[in-house]
Amino acid sequence: MADQRPAVSVRSVNCPNCGAATAVRTFGHAVNVVCMSCRSILDAKDPGVTILQKYRDAVPREPLIPLGSRGTLPGETIQREVVGFQVREIIVDHIPYQWREYLLFNPYHGFRYLTEYAGHWNVVSTLRSLPDGDHLPGNSGTRGFDGQQFAHFQTATAKTVFVLGEFPWQVRVGDTVTAVDYVAPPRMLSAEVTSGQEVTWSLGQYTPGAEIWKGLGLPGSAPNPEGVFADQPSPYVTVTRRMWRNAAWLLAAATLLWIFHLASARSRQVFTQAFRYDPRQIQDASLVTPLFEIDGRQSAVRVETQTDLDNQWIGVGYALVNDGTGQSFEFAREVSFYAGVEDGESWTEGSRSDSVTLPTIPPGRYFLRIEPEGERIGKPVEYRVNVIEDVATSLWYLITVLLVMVPPIVTSIRASGFESRRWAESDHGSAGSSDEDADDADDDGEDGDDD
């Protein structure tokens, strides 16, 4: 079939303004042609080639992709040629924000567009069918297309400030349209509404500049993107989902292990004895308990202190000593209990009992060295010490939950920050909202008015 296609020819026109010859590559499609020499806009349909608009004070804008560049767009195998270039802008708070659009052409497959703002690129094609909803776009809500919902991002007035090459539509410097963008990253649904209420819908696909450069065989490298663009896909979405999925599996495994640990813990009492401490006696009150056996596997051991305190405190220094190895586990506890009546209401503070859990105690024969202390003017305290082996602990489980949850939470916060920066550039962001003319849209959104 390719061999049966007619040969494609390129004709040239001479600019009536400066006399320079300008090639016309899009044949019968060309409506306007811009003189490459003086930038005058010519009527390509007129056999006499009349001047539609002169550039009196033309400021040359060099496109990043030179006209005449040929190659393929990402995801395509069709060769296309860059035939047109224009710069468009909106003004926000008296500051112009501009983006660039490139027109690519293949004589058998028609046109495609490339848009670029601050290093962010979109491959754009005109839609043959309308999105769901009203014919005219709005300033809020969503629009459905191709089974996907697009959220309104921005409405703005876009103005053409520079053109170069040839175009299949009437184009002038100073032309304005109302551009409305809806996003569902990495895609953007855009509408351009003329003053006559004619609407053109297009669909853009966010594309890394490196892929554009590779497909068109351009020298050097694409400019690095700046900021967050309207339909730029978040780099955190896939990572965040994977992290939360992995965290769910790890938490499920840790929970099952924790439940098994709770169910298998014996919580067996291996020692209990009552003691009396009189703080008024001057002699040393320290003591050593009889030996007791901690058997089985290495496990957590809980030491409980139960007292009959009454408006006083007692401090107890403990040392759990392995009789065979001499290994010692030392710790100190303070127990206090106070009660009274104030303004007719009773109150209490503290507790008469206390417990501490030693997480990893190996089996063996042990004894406790106990050193109590208290107020010298206090009354005697009766206290009992209990030692319980193989008790269930949850600290390790809580630490595991914390360690597992931190990475996905941090990544989710970063993802939220990325989305906040995206939508801060929209009509609905905290950076500002649009008025009826949508002149308060910001730069990322403006650049999104790409077709």
Image: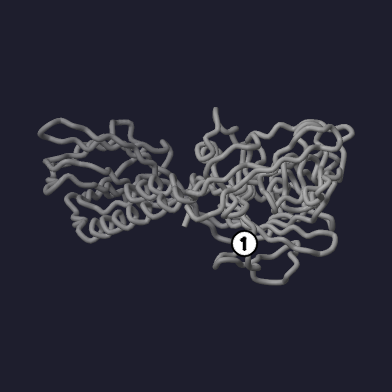
Which residue does the numbered mark 1 point to in the structure image?
150
Residue 110, how many percent across, how many down? 61, 54
- Left or right: residue 110 versus residue 336 is right
- Left or right: residue 47 versus residue 12 is right
Residue in the foreground of this view, choosing between 211 and 186: 211
The amino acid sitting under disc 1 is: Phe
Residue drawn at 86 percent across, 35 percent down: 17
Residue drawn at 12 percent across, 46 percent down: 293
Does residue 102 appear in the picture of this structure? no
Q: Residue furthest right?
A: 56
Q: Quadrant of residue 278?
A: top left
Residue in the foreground of this view, choosing between 355 and 222: 222
Label 1: how many residues lie within 10 Å, few (<14), some (14-19) or many (20+)?
Answer: many
Number of numbered discs: 1
Above/below status of 166 relative to 196: above
Residue drawn at 59 percent across, 37 percent down: 69
- Left or right: residue 282 versus residue 10 is left
Residue drawn at 22 percent across, 51 percent down: 388
Residue in the foreground of this view, choosing between 86 and 303: 86
Residue 134, how many percent across, how many down? 72, 71
Does residue 375 appear in the picture of this structure? yes
Residue 116, how many percent across, how many down? 65, 42
Residue 101, how many percent across, how many down? 68, 44
Above/below status of 187 relative to 35: below
Q: Residue furthest top?
A: 220
> Circle 1 sits in a helix, a strand or a loop, which is it?
strand
